[in-house]
């Protein structure tokens, strides 16, 4: 059994098999198997067929053995019970003979002696006797010798049979067997790499197949060498034989030629180098093939012949029973498929867990035997699988187990047995050679074995395997010590700064926290994680792991594009790959080539939960989830923020979250913000100049000053959109919309400049109110449109609201007839007010018109004025004249009544005013009635009318105008119909038609009386006062059923801010502060703008803004209030003292208490 | 260890700052530039205690800026190996804890904590605790620096409390 493979094999095999044989194969052919079994006594039938190379040898021995046995048998048969007896008998015979002869001789001597003493005759007789005796003795000897020789030969043969006779037979034939020119040649055939073995087998099968046909293969043998991938060797007399043999085999590349192997190389091809497997229990090996390929295993025991080793390793059990059932349930073909499928998808390494396996495969599949389990024919113990594997299927060299793998073994054992008996020195041993290589002069080493154990010092020189170092400490200080390199290891102590030179953690640096034998644990500089490495792999280093965080062009914490929609931040760099956290929070391992590009987010800005700007580098805190804090590394699409916090262990401290879920932790950039940058221009010196240029120079393109300005589109499909002018081309501009990043080409006339404060200005003129006068003329064309509408409410049809933006630039608004031009917008209004301002008469005209609301509106400011005068007296209810009005009673005029009490009662105009006021009131019913007829709903809704102080103020008049213009009562209805919405909560919309219908004819016809009609402010009057609004004193009017159900009706407020939505779909709202009454100082937000009417100044020295009229837009100071319609003011700028209508003024801020 | 050290700092001044308040600018700039920074060589500059010489400005040709090399005296803090310092625990993880020693962050590995003190993952805040002592956030500890890592702009140290007279202090 122990004899090596030698040429005897070839010898025997050649004689036995002449067609095909496979050499250097681990498997036996079936044929052999059969032979073997025949030859065997039957005891070995169950042996695995994939056993060993040397079964050939066994087999030969078996062959020999029976022969020997036979011999032995025959011998025993022949020699009877004991050859000893036989020998003894023979010996006894010989001895007898000798004895006889001796006796005989004695006799003769005796006779002779007697004869000597006797006569002559006796002496002759004695001579004859002697001769005869001699002859006889000689004959005897000859026969004996032959027998002896035979005997000896037999005896030696018998004893020699115990030792295989392999002397001469072994060497002589080998010489003779060396191939010569007369022998068949060896041909090299190229095949698909990896398929060599299969092809050899298929060749063999083919040979068997066609052996007894009329065209048997004429090749003698074929073999393959593992060390020579991609080729097989075929022994044949001719190339044709090889060609025909290989013809039709898949994977054979006959096209690449069949090469003759030179005779002298043939032998070496078949030379097998016997490898010395010295596997010791406890050694580490790796699997070569199969499911466990590459897995680390520990040797438990080795069979005596060293061919099999009992291994322990971590099992890979596929715990998905679905596949298993499929396997069982289906036929063989399917099963094969299933197994191959599971082979491709290799289950992960997991320790055997009885419960899990039982759960997956059922209780029956696992048997328990002592402390181990049997499952699928394998034994599992302590979670490991224990299996005998042929050593040829193991990698025994360069195993290099990693610390991770070993600790895996260790941990499991630890868990089971409560101790670590893992011998790390095994790894260390394996790596010791490498350790010598990494030693360098200057390294701090210590001796850990041998006589000098414990001595440490600094390496002086390394000479081959001998390390010379200068010892430190104790009495050896300064001495030179020479030790074998394998006995020293690098020495580190806590606090050393080290760098990893090789292995998984290469280039990591850190501070050593502990040293246990040859394992050093250090705290990584990069991740602040503890890392354990072998001392051989590290070196003291001064630098911080700079190399660690860069692979290729990418660095740690770079924002990288992984694919079209995925970006990620590198949170860990490995030797040649990255760990990346993508925006969805997934981590992945990527190679540098998988990264499309690196992105920067230096300029990216997002808003945090409070709407503040966040940028890269800000310290933020998560408001939801785990509440982590971190420093923003990157912002992606203004939505995702990647943050980093060293204290978070997960993903290297990098995490991703939504920017909206973040809040700033600290005031921004504390450190850097301190002090101005003295190397730049002093902001204090050139500040003004700079401030001016910085902003605008950016926006001012080289060709057109309009390029880059922010505009709002006031007409067309994109009405209300805000954008930036990208380019201009004659009358057109290309505008990039803010909303959707789209660039649209739009007529410049449809654009308005949008100032930073949100106000709108003429595009070309660069802000300011435009002169509205020109539009007076253009108003004419709009008339037909209105009348053309037929229905009195053309405005309704379109549902448009007056365009607030038209305020500043009316022209386009007018020309674009689809829009609802706002008649009240400035220009047109001015003359009307002028008129009224001059003549108190308008009331006369007002009286003429049946519309009561004109009058209704007028007194109100005064009413409030009065109330202001005597605050305490006023109750919220008193501010709601509308209620009484709805009753149709004169009580509606209670405010007017108040007037009488007020300080300003005296002036004549006032009285007249009152009378006038009454007049419309009296007339009021008429329109009401008509309204009820023409449009019941609005009519019925009396409340709206009540509500209407503002309404009345705003538009009613307008209503008249058509009336006047058309000269029919029917026309009078129109306004009322139009008012419906007013009452019904959409006052604004309701106004529109009024405004339109009314003003147009009025403007066109230019009927003076009409102009004289006093009007309430347009609801948009506020919107028109862009930028000048906060602080204005206003009064809430018309909210009876709408805003808070009129709770704040007639409340005096000061404006805090106004929101101009800029389109008809959203209310224009204001936030205001109540300045009087029980709710003083309460802030109201989202008060619809149309409910706010200006509060005129009532007191000398009070500041006011002319919100309409001649002085529109100017600040004035009230000097003297002459009456409800008349006052003297001084303009703020020029200081010109002039007359003004208080109603055109809106008081500003709190009046001083005096 | 704290030292009083004379140091220099170079300030570049834009011409627009030349004028009566130049001195003031420079001083402010010096303070803001220097205090709280860390140089590997000298450690953390805790506070400027005096400006010895703001320097004579040299106008640089080309830019017109003036360069002032200011000399000042400052308190610096430089940690040394073997130094015993007091700190406040800032963060406790299972690997150990981080303590702030003034501006310096010191990590004390669990290996350098006495084995009696075990990490208690269930405690809130996380802590290392033995029968008598507990180390959690804001605990004051006395520790010995066993190693420092000195970068150009940062110093990091690891410490131990596994020796006599080290550990929690009251």
Image (cartoon, coloured by chain):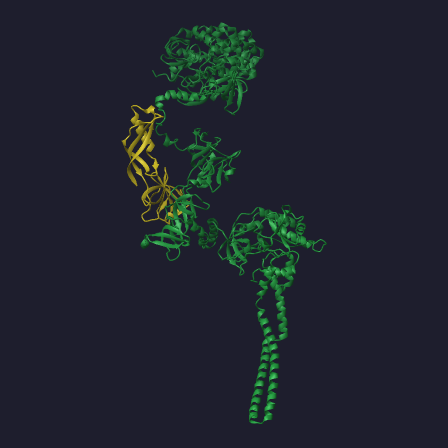
The image shows residue A29 at horizontal and vertical percentages of 63, 56
Residue B149 falls left or right of residue B73: right
**Camera-nearest residue between A619 and A173:** A173
Picture quadrant where residue A668 is located: top left
The image shows residue A93 at horizontal and vertical percentages of 59, 81
Q: Chain A in the picture: what colour?
A: green
Q: Which chain, by letter, is yellow? A: B
Figure quadrant of the C terminus of chain A: top left
The image shows residue A835 at horizontal and vertical percentages of 45, 7
Picture quadrant where residue A671 is located: top left
Figure quadrant of the N terminus of chain A: bottom right
**Camera-nearest residue between A1035 and A810:** A810
Residue A3 falls left or right of residue A206: left
Total tally of numbered discs in the picture: 0
**Given the current orientation, which residue lies at the most extreme right position?**
A214
The image shows residue A376 at horizontal and vertical percentages of 58, 53
Mark yes or no: residue A582 visible: yes
A994 is higher (above) or lower (below) than A635: above
A208 is higher (above) or lower (below) than A652: below
**Camera-nearest residue between A855 and A584:** A584
Mark yes or no: residue A1066 visible: no
Picture quadrant where residue B157 is located: top left
């Amino acid at each position: 059994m122990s004899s090596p493979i030698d040429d005897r094999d070839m010898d025997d095999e050649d004689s036995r098999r002449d067609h095909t044989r496979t050499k250097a194969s681990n498997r036996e052919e079936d044929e052999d198997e059969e032979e073997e079994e025949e030859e065997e006594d039957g005891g070995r039938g169950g042996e695995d067929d994939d056993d060993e190379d040397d079964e050939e040898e066994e087999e030969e021995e078996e062959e020999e053995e029976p022969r020997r046995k036979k011999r032995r048998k025959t011998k025993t048969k022949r020699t009877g019970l004991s050859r000893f007896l036989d020998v003894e008998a023979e010996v006894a015979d010989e001895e007898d003979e000798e004895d006889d002869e001796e006796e005989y001789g004695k006799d003769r001597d005796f006779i002779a002696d007697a004869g000597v003493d006797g006569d002559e005759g006796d002496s002759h007789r004695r001579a004859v006797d002697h001769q005869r005796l001699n002859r006889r003795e000689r004959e005897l000897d000859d026969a004996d010798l032959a027998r002896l020789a035979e005997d000896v030969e037999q005896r030696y043969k018998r004893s020699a049979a115990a030792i295989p006779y392999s002397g001469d037979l072994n060497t002589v034939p080998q010489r003779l067997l060396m191939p010569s020119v007369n022998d068949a040649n060896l041909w090299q055939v190229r095949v698909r790499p990896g398929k060599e073995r299969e092809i050899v087998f298929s060749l063999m099968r083919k040979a068997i197949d066609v052996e007894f046909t009329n065209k048997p293969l004429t090749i003698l043998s074929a073999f393959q060498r593992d060390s020579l991938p991609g080729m097989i060797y075929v022994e044949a007399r001719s190339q044709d034989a090889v060609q025909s043999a290989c013809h039709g085999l898949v994977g054979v590349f006959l096209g690449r030629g069949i090469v003759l192997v030179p005779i002298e190389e043939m032998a070496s091809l078949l030379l097998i180098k016997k490898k010395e497997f010295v596997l010791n229990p406890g050694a580490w090996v790796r699997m070569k093939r199969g499911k466990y390929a590459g897995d680390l295993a520990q040797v438990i025991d080795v069979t005596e012949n060293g061919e099999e080793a009992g291994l322990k390793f971590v099992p890979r059990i596929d715990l998905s029973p679905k596949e298993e059932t499929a396997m069982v349930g289906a036929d063989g073909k399917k099963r094969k498929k299933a197994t191959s499928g599971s082979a491709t998808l290799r289950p992960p390494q997991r320790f055997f867990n009885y419960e899990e396996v039982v759960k997956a495969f059922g209780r029956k599949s696992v048997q328990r035997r002592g402390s181990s389990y049997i499952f699928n024919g394998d034994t599992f113990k302590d979670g490991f699988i224990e299996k005998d594997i042929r050593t040829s299927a193991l990698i025994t060299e360069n195993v290099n187990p990693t610390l991770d793998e070993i600790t895996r073994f260790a941990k499991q054992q630890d868990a089971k047995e409560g101790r670590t008996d893992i011998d790390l020195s095994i790894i260390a041993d394996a790596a010791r050679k490498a350790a010598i290589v990494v030693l360098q002069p200057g390294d701090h080493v210590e001796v850990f074995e041998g006589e000098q154990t414990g001595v440490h010092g600094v390496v002086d020189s390394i000479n081959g395997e001998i390390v010379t170092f200068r010892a430190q400490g104790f009495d050896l200080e300064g001495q030179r010590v020479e030790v074998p390199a394998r006995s020293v290891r690098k020495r580190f102590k806590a606090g050393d700064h080290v760098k990893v030179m090789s292995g998984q953690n290469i280039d990591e640096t850190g501070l050593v926290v502990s040293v246990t034998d040859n394992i050093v644990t250090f705290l990584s500089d990069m991740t602040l994680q503890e890392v354990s490495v072998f001392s051989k792999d590290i070196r003291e280093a001064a630098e911080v792991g700079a190399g660690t965080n860069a692979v290729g062009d990418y660095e740690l914490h770079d924002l990288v594009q992984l694919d079209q929609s995925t970006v990620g931040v590198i949170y860990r760099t490995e030797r040649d790959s990255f760990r990346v956290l993508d925006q969805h929070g997934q981590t992945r391992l990527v190679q540098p080539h998988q990264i499309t590009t690196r992105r920067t987010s230096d300029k990216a800005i997002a808003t945090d939960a409070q709407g503040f700007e966040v940028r890269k580098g800000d310290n933020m805190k998560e408001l939801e989830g785990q509440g982590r804090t971190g420093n923003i590394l990157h912002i992606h699409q203004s939505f995702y923020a990647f943050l980093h916090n060293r204290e978070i262990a997960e993903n290297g401290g990098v995490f991703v979250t939504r920017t909206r879920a973040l809040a700033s932790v600290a005031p921004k950039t504390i450190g850097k913000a301190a002090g101005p940058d003295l190397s730049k221009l002093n902001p204090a010196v050139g500040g003004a100049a700079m401030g001016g240029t910085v902003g605008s120079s950016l926006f001012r393109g080289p060709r057109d000053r309009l390029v880059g300005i922010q505009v709002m589109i006031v007409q067309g499909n994109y009405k209300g959109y805000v954008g930036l002018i990208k380019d201009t081309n004659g009358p057109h501009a290309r505008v990039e919309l803010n909303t959707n990043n789209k660039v649209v080409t739009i007529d410049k006339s449809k654009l308005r400049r949008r100032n930073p404060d949100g106000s709108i200005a003429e595009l070309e003129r660069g802000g300011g109110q435009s002169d509205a006068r020109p539009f007076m003329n253009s108003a004419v064309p709009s008339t037909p449109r209105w009348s053309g509408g037929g229905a009195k409410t053309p405005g309704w049809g379109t549902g448009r609201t007056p365009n607030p933006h038209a305020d500043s630039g009316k022209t386009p608004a007018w020309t674009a007839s689809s829009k609802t031009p706002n008649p009240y917008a400035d220009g047109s209004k001015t003359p009307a007010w002028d008129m009224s301002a001059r003549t108190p008469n308008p009331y006369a005209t007002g009286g003429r018109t049946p519309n009561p609301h004109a009058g209704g509106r007028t007194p109100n400011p005064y009413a409030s004025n009065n109330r202001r005068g005597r605050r305490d007296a006023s109750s919220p209810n008193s501010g709601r004249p509308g209620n009484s009005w709805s009753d149709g009673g004169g009580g509606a005029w209670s405010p007017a009544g108040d007037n009488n009490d007020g300080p300003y009662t005296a002036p004549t105009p006032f009285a007249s005013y009152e009378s006038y006021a009454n007049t419309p009131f009296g007339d009021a019913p008429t329109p009401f009635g008509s309204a009820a007829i023409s449009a019941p709903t609005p009519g019925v809704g009396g409340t709206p009318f009540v509500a209407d102080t503002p309404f009345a103020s705003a538009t009613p008049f307008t209503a008249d105008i058509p009336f006047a213009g058309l000269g029919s009562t029917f026309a009078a209805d129109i306004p009322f119909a139009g008012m419906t919405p007013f009452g019904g909560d959409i006052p604004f919309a309701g106004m529109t038609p009024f405004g339109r219908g009314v003003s147009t004819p009025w403007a066109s016809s230019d009927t003076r009386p009409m102009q004289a009609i006093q009007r309430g402010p347009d609801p948009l009057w506020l919107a028109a006062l862009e930028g000048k609004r906060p602080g204005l004193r206003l009064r809430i009017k018309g909210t009876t059923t709408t805003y808070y159900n009129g709770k704040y009706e007639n409340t005096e407020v000061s404006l805090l801010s106004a929101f101009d939505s800029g389109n008809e779909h959203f209310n224009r709202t204001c936030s205001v502060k109540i300045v009087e009454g029980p709710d003083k100082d309460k802030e109201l937000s989202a008060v619809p703008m149309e409910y706010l009417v200006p509060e005129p100044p009532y007191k000398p020295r009070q500041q006011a803004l002319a919100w309409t009229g001649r002085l529109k837009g100017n600040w004035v100071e009230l000097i003297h209030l002459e009456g409800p319609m008349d006052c003297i003011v001084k303009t703020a700028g020029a200081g010109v003292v002039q007359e003004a209508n208080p109603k055109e003024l809106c008081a500003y801020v709190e009046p001083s208490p005096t | 260890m704290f030292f009083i050290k004379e140091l220099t700092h170079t300030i570049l001044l834009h011409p627009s700052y030349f004028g009566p308040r130049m001195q003031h600018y420079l001083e402010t700039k010096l303070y803001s530039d220097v205090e709280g920074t860390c140089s590997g060589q000298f450690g953390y500059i805790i506070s400027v205690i005096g400006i010895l010489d703001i320097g004579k400005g040299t106008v640089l040709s080309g830019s017109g800026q003036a360069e002032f090399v200011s000399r000042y005296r400052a308190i610096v803090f430089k940690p040394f190996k073997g130094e015993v310092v007091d700190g406040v625990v800032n963060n406790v993880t299972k690997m150990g804890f981080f303590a702030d020693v003034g501006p310096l962050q010191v990590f004390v590995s669990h290996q350098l904590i006495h084995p009696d003190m075990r990490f208690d993952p269930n405690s809130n805040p996380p802590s290392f605790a033995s029968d008598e002592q507990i180390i959690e956030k804001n605990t004051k500890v006395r520790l010995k620096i066993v190693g420092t890592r000195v970068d150009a702009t940062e110093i990091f140290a690891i410490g131990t409390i596994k020796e006599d007279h080290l550990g929690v202090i009251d």
